[in-house]
């Protein structure tokens, strides 16, 4: 399986930057949760990650529609699942239940990394090769 760096070398510059920002925000969230950072700052970071992910996913989904991408629904399902998990983390943080959030955030980092390396790579190949 290709790693994210290999995928990003093949992806267009905008998508590459978006993925790097998304992964960086999620990485910062993981560190904040693991180190017990201030809840207000952690909440703001999580909110930024959710907003950024929504915008990124929306742009990807628009591209998939424009290119008549055959795997649109499965890809979109991944996006919806990831947003549900992020929103669940936000709800846990807001209710003062951060006990398992660090592990969930790390799992989410793996999930998004896997999504980028597989589903997004397939989409990029589809667009780049005109499949």
Image (cartoon, rainbow, N blue to C red):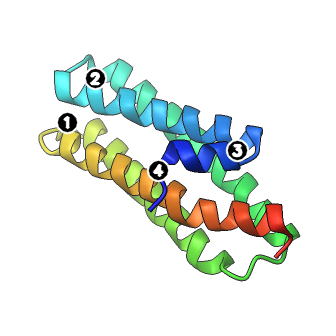
Q: Gap in Å between the C-alphas at discs 4 and 3? A: 15 Å
Residue 67 marker: none
User: Label 3: few (<14), some or many (≥20) within 10 Å?
Assistant: some
**Residue tagged by mark 2?**
39
State the image coordinates of residue 67 (x, y, percent, origin top left).
85, 71
Give the quarter of the figure containing the N terminus: bottom left
Q: In this figure, which residue is indicated by the disc labeled 1? A: 96
Q: Residue at x 28, y 24 (%)?
A: 32
Instruction: Give the mark toward the camera: 1 or 3.
Output: 3
User: Which residue lies under the disc numbered 3?
Assistant: 15
Element type at marker 4?
Answer: loop
Q: Tell me the number on the disc at residue 3.
A: 4
Label 2 SS: helix
Residue located at (43% from left, 58% from top): 114
- Position of residue 114 in the picture relative to residue 100 (left or right): right
Quote the CA–CA distance across marks 4 and 1: 35 Å
First along the sequence among labels 1 and 2: 2
Give the quadrant of the C terminus.
bottom right
Q: CA distance from mark 1 to mark 3?
A: 34 Å
The reply to whether discs 1 and 2 touch (Cβ–Cβ < 8 Å) is yes
């Amino acid at each position: 399986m290709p790693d994210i760096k290999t995928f990003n070398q093949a992806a267009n510059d905008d998508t590459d930057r978006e993925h790097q920002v998304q992964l960086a925000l999620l990485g910062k969230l993981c560190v904040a949760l693991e180190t017990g950072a201030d809840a207000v700052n952690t909440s703001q970071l999580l909110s930024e990650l959710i907003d950024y992910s929504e915008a990124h996913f929306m742009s990807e989904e628009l591209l998939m529609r424009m290119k008549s991408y055959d795997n649109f629904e499965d890809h979109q399902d991944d996006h919806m699942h990831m947003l549900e998990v992020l929103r669940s983390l936000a709800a846990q943080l807001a209710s003062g239940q951060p006990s398992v959030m660090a592990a969930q955030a790390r799992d989410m980092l793996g999930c998004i990394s896997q999504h980028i390396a597989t589903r997004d790579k397939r989409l990029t190949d589809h667009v780049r090769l005109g499949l």
